[in-house]
Amino acid sequence: MSVKNAGPIAHYRHLNFGQRVVRDWKLNKWKYLLIIPVLVYLALFCYKPMYGLVIAFKNYKPTRGIERSAWMDPWYAWFEKFFTDPYFGRLIGNTFTISILTIVFGFPAPILLALLLNEINHNKFKRTVQTITYMPYFISMVVTCALIRVYCQQDGLLSDIVVFFGGERQNWLMNSGNYRTIYIISEIWQTIGWNSIIYLAALSSIDQEQYEAARIDGANRFQQCLHITLPGLMPTITILFILRMGNILNVGYEKTLLLYNSNIYDVSDIISTYTYRLSFGGGTPQYSYSTAIGLFNTLVNVVFLLATNFISSKVSDSSLF
Amino acid sequence: MKKILALALCLCMVLAAVPALAADLLPAGDTYPLKTDKTITWYSQDCLNPHEKYGNWTESPFHTNLAKLLGVNIEWSFPTTGADGSSFTNTMMADPGSLPNIMKGYFMDTANQLLEDEVIWDLTDYIQEYAPAYYAWLQTNPAYDRAMKTDDGRYYAFGFFREDGGWNDSYLGPVVRQDWLKECGLEVPTTISELENVIRVFKEKYDAQFAFANDGRFRQAGVQGAFGAYATGYVASDYGWFVKDGKVGFGATQPEWREYMKWLNKMWTEGLIDQDSFSLDDTSIKAKVETGKSGVAYTSMGQLNLWNKDMGGDYWIGVHFPTADDGSISSQFGGFGIGTHTTVITKTADEETMKLCLQMLDYAYTQEGFLFWNYGIEGESWEMSAETGLPKWTPLVADDHDNDPMTKYNGATWGNSCIQATNLLYLKNSQTAIEANDAFFYTFGKDEYFADEAVKEKTLAVTGGWKWPVGITFTTDESDKLDLLGGNSNLNTYVAENYAAFITGSKDIADDAVWEAYLAGFDSLNLTKILEIRQGALDRYEAR
C-alpha cells in the first residue's frame, strides 16, 4: 500500500532524496546497522543466485561448471530456439488461456464466498462452512488429481451420473473440450476456502459504525454490501490482484502434469510442462534451454506486474510501489 | 510337488540347451583380497541401494561383504532417498573435483565430453593389465566390446550384461485371462486376428475390454510387429528408431505404422479398448484387470505375477507377441542383454588408485565375483543344489518374506557393473512370471529356438536386431546440435499427441490428407537432420 505521507519525512519535502538520506543518516546512524543482516540476506540469497541465469546464454554442461561452459553463438540462440519452436504459439496460448480463465473465474470466487459468509449471523453454521470449504486446500495435489482422474474415468462417478440421465460413458479427460472446465472447477474447489480467509480478515476490520450509519440512512443489506463492504475490501482485492498478475505465466506444472495425457496436449500443454519434459522426458537434461525459457517467463511476469501496478496506481490509490 | 517338478524340468531344459554358463567361461579371480589400506568412494545412482530394511549401507551384507572380499575399504554413497537419481548424479557432476572414485550412472550419452574434459579416466591403456577378466568377457561377443567403448576405441566403463542374452529384456508383452479362454473354448492367440477375436469374444461375453497402461508400457512397444512396423508412440530415449540393413529409420513415419494405427483406431471406435488406457498406470490398471473389466491386457511379467497373487490363482498368462496372419513379425519389445548402465572411474582417483579401482570392478567378471554379485556368499545366502548343479537360496533368503530379500546379499538383481545370471532370474521370479517371459521372448516357440539355429536367429532379429544399439555415442558437437534441433523431446511430443489422436479418431488416420499433413509436420521438427546425425553415429558404431 502506498506510504506517501509517512512520518516526519513529510516536513522535509523541499529537500531532494539524496539530501534526505544524508540527513536521516546523521540522525539515525546506528539504526541503519539493523538493516545490514537483511541486506546480506538479500544479496546472498536473492541476488547472487541470479548469476546462474547466465547459463541461459551458455551451453551449460554440469561438469564444466558455469565458468567454463562455452557461450552460445549467437548469445540468444536458446531464446531463438524457443521463439521458433513449432510449439511456441500453442504453449503461450495455453498458458495464458488457463491462467486468465483461472483469474476470471477463480479470483472473484473467494471474494463472493467471503461476502456471503459475512452475511451469515449463525456463528456455528458460518464456521462449519468455512472449515469445509478450506479443507480441500490441505489435500495433497497428487491425491486431488488422482481423485479427479478416477471420477473422470469411463466407469467413474461422472460417467455414472451422465449415464443416469441418458448420456454415454466416456473418459472425460480424453476430450480436449472438457479439460479446461475440469481444471478450473477443481482449482476453485480446492482454493476457494483458503483464499477467502484473507478477505474475511479484511472484512472484520471494517468499522461497524459505518453499517449503523447506513442502516439509519435506510440502506438495505445489499446496499450496505455494495457501498461499505466492497469499498472496504477494495485495497486488499487490488493488492492481491496485482500480486496475482505477477504470476500470470506461472501456471503450476504439477496439476497439469498429473491431469493431462497426450490426447489433450493441444489444450493442456503449458510452458512449465514443456520445460519439465525437456528435463525429464528422456535424454540428457537441457539446462541452458530450460533456464532461457524460465528467464523469458520471469520477464513476462514482471511486465504484467508492473503494468497492473501502474494501471492500478492511476485509477485507484492502491499500488504496491 | 507338481510345481517343483515343473521347475526342475524347466531348469534341466535350460541346462541342456545353454552349452556353457557364464560362470564356466570366466577366469578365476585369484588376486583377491587385494590387501590395501586405501579407502575407495563408490557411488551408485540406482539398482544397488541397500535393502529398504537397512538404515544405511554399513548394515547391508552385500556392501560390507564386497569390501571384505576385495580387501579394500569402500565408502558407499547413493542418491538421497526419494530423490530423482539422474538429477542427483547431474548435481554431483557439477563439482568434478569432489566426485567419488567410482560412479555408476548412465554416461553413454556424455562419454565423449567426460573424457575430453578429463572428468573420467580413459581406461584403454590399463584395462588389459588391471581388468583382465572384464576385458576377456568383452572379447567373447563383438557386440559387448562395441557397446563399451567410444568410436575411437577408448574404453571408459564397466557395463551390465545378462547371461541369457535377450531373454529377460522381453519382460513386457500381451497377457490374457486363461480361464476365460477355456470357458469360451478359444485357443491361445498367436496372430493379430486371433488376438482381435479373443478381445471381441471377451467383450461380448464378459463386457471386458483390452486395457493397458499407455505411458511406460504399451506406448514403448506394443503389438506393432504384426503390421511390419517398428515403433509405437514413444520416441523419447531410443524407442522409435530402428535399424534395417545399416540404415536408421524413424518408425512413426512408416506406412506400416499407419496400418497399426488404423487397427488400433478400429478397436477403439468399436469400444474394444478401454478408454482409460491413456491415463492408466501399473496401480490403477489393477482395478480393471482384477475385477473382470478386462480380459486382454499388456504388462510386465512382474505385474502379471502381482495380479495373479491378488486374485488368488493363475488367471492371467503371458502370450506370444502376435504375428501377422502369415506368421511374420517385424519387431517386438526386447533387447540384446546389454544394459545402459555404466560404471566409470573418475579423475579424483590418481593413477595408482585408478588401477586399484579397475581391479575392484574386475572382480564381478571373475568366477568367484560372478557368484558373489549374483548370490552373495556361499553357505550364507546360497548353496549348490545337488539336483540342478546351480546355486539355490539357503533358508536365510528363501524364508525371508521381505520384498526381494536377495537384494540384501547380491548386487546383480537389477543391473550394475556385473553379469546377471539367468538362474538368478529363475530363482527370483515365480513360475507364472517365467512362463510369461518365455512366451514374450520365444515368439517362434521355445523348443524350436533351441533346436533350430534359423529360428534362434529370427527370434533375435525380432527382439533386439531392429533396435537402436546400446552404446552408440554422439560426439560433443553432435549432442549440442541435437539439443538445438529440438532432439527427442519435440519429436516425442508430436508423435505421442498424434498417436493418441489417430487412435481415438480425433484425427482420421484413413484420410490421406491427414496422413500427409502429419508427415509434413516432421519438417519443422528437423527429423531429416536428426536422422542424418544418427546415421553418422551408427556408421561409426558399426565401424568400431
Image (cartoon, rainbow, N blue to C red):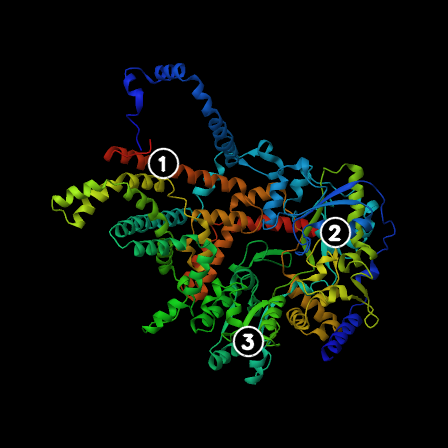
Q: Amino acid at mark 3?
A: Leu
Q: Can you give x and y, in whole percent of width and height, for residue B97 in the image?
A: 67, 35
Category of crowding for the residue at label 1, using alpha-carbon neighbours closer than 10 angstroms: few (below 14), some (14–19), many (at least 20): few
Q: Residue at x 74, y 64 (%)?
A: B397
Closest to the camera, between mark 2 and mark 3, is 2
Nearest the eye: A62 or A205: A205
What is the spatial separation of the Cα atoms under label 2 and label 1, in whole angstroms?
55 Å
Q: Are marks 2 and 3 on the same chain?
A: yes
Asked where in the image residue B90 lies, by quadrant, the reply is: top right
Q: Are marks 1 and 3 on the same chain?
A: no
Category of crowding for the residue at label 2, using alpha-carbon neighbours closer than 10 angstroms: few (below 14), some (14–19), many (at least 20): many
**Subunit bearing disc 3:** B
Asked where in the image residue A235 lies, by quadrant, the reply is: top left
Point out which mark residue B195 bears: 3
Q: Can you give x and y, in whole percent of width and height, for residue B512 in the image?
A: 42, 63
**Subunit bearing disc 2:** B
Q: Is residue B531 above or below residue B277?
A: above
Closest to the camera, between mark 2 and mark 1, is 2
Q: Quadrant of the N terminus of chain A?
A: top left
Question: Residue B500 vs residue B242: left or right?
Answer: left
Query: SS of the residue at dot 2?
Result: helix
Tell me if I can see residue B127 in this picture: no
Residue that mark 1 sits on: A303
